[in-house]
Image (cartoon, rainbow, N blue to C red):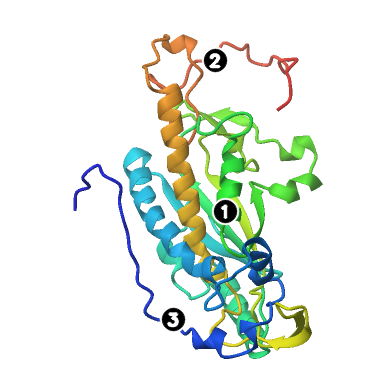
Amino acid sequence: DITLGTPLAMLVRNKDQRSGDYLENDMSVAYRPSHADATYDAKYGVRAIAGGGRSSARETIGRVAAGAVARKILKLYNNIEVLAYVSKVQEIEAKNVDHDAFTMEDVDANIVRCPDEASAARMLERIDEIRKQGNSIGGVVTCVARNVPAGLGAPVFDKLEADLAKACMSIPAAKGFESGDGFAGTLLTGKEHNDEFYIDPETGATRTKTNRSGGIQGGISNGENIVVHVAFKPTSTIAQSQSTVTRDGQEVELRGKGRHDPCVLPRAVPMVEAMVAITLVDALMCQQAQCELFPNTASLDERPNPMGTTAKREGGPKKSTVPVGSGPVGLKVDEE
């Protein structure tokens, strides 16, 4: 049960494959619409017909295994917890999910992996309806990382949300990424969207009243919950007939065969958790190497006030020196 300091190796043998589902029908010569069949062939001049090769979600077993190790590191470091759930199936959206309180048990309480039971029932009904039609649907997975300390990330090319976006968008079928309020924030004014700061009366730490930034500002974590949303497209292999072409350029009709999910979202939940956990551990190691290699010898008064849900100011909240009833402080600042 103890690591040796050497690289960890994991091997998973897939004993539940059905190659015949791919090889003994038209899928062996025709490209599946919106699948990676055609682009892999265009790039390499060859493709893995049986199971899709590296374009198959089977490759994510390595991500999830590595994510399990990353989760242990995060837990030990600052009790960081990474949890994801299905937040949307087509237009059916989960409601009343408390990002501070929902648990893995809440997520796994139903096969849709949505902690809102009422919405989960509607999602399952929609998925089953689509399955009976031989079709597929997509939706959104939301991931929350709690107890992440402030300071992770970088200000320019290696912004934390940029690294998270690349990690999550590398998951099969992922087609969109949002950090915090994402695109919904474009409908708000600055006053509505800004997360106003306040001082936690118990810890003395700098906190935000809202979390529309999703725990990241200027590419760096601010100590609040990190919240990201990953959109997944409908499964490309469906049982309905579709127009396509063969490898040698003939137009044909294709109907998918084999075992293919009508909705990938429930399976995508642990994949998103794994990629977020791996990215956070990477950011933690970068932070340790860049900013924490040597101790900060500045006096307490010369340091910025501690920030975030798990931060505490030595001696508690600082006594205010601003006169009661004074107006807003005017500042000229550069915008991030």
For the residues labelled 2 and 1, the Cα–Cα distance comes to 43 Å
Image point (76%, 80%), residue name: 244
Do residues under tags 2 and 1 come within 8 Å of each other at their CB atoms?
no
Q: Work out whether residue 210 or residue 173 is closer to the camera in this orientation and state it.
A: 173
Work out whether 310 lies above or below 305. Answer: below
Image point (57%, 67%), residue name: 55
**Which residue matches tag 1?**
168
For marks 2 and 1, the one nearer the N-term is 1
Q: Amino acid at mark 2?
A: Ser
**Which residue matches tag 2?**
320
Q: Amino acid at mark 1?
A: Cys
Coordinates of residue 44 in the picture (x, y in percent): 62, 62
Work out whether 306 lies above or below 28. Answer: above
Q: Secondary structure at mark 3?
A: loop
Tell me if mark 2 has few (under 14), some (14-19) or many (20+) residues whose alpha carbon lies within 10 angstroms of its own: few
Coordinates of residue 189 in the picture (x, y in percent): 80, 39
For marks 2 and 3, the one nearer the N-term is 3
The answer, for residue 93, to whether it is visible in the render is no
Coordinates of residue 21 in the picture (x, y in percent): 54, 87
Q: Secondary structure at mark 1?
A: helix
Work out whether 176 lies above or below 238. Answer: above
For the residues labelled 2 and 3, the Cα–Cα distance comes to 66 Å
Instruction: Give left or right: position of 113 versus 66.
Output: right
**Which residue matches tag 3?**
17
Coordinates of residue 312 in the picture (x, y in percent): 41, 27
Tell me if mark 3 has few (under 14), some (14-19) or many (20+) residues whose alpha carbon lies within 10 angstroms of its own: few
Work out whether 256 lies above or below 160. Answer: below
Do residues under tags 2 and 3 come within 8 Å of each other at their CB atoms?
no
Instruction: Give left or right: position of 48 versus 312.
Output: right
Tell me if mark 1 has few (under 14), some (14-19) or many (20+) residues whose alpha carbon lies within 10 angstroms of its own: many
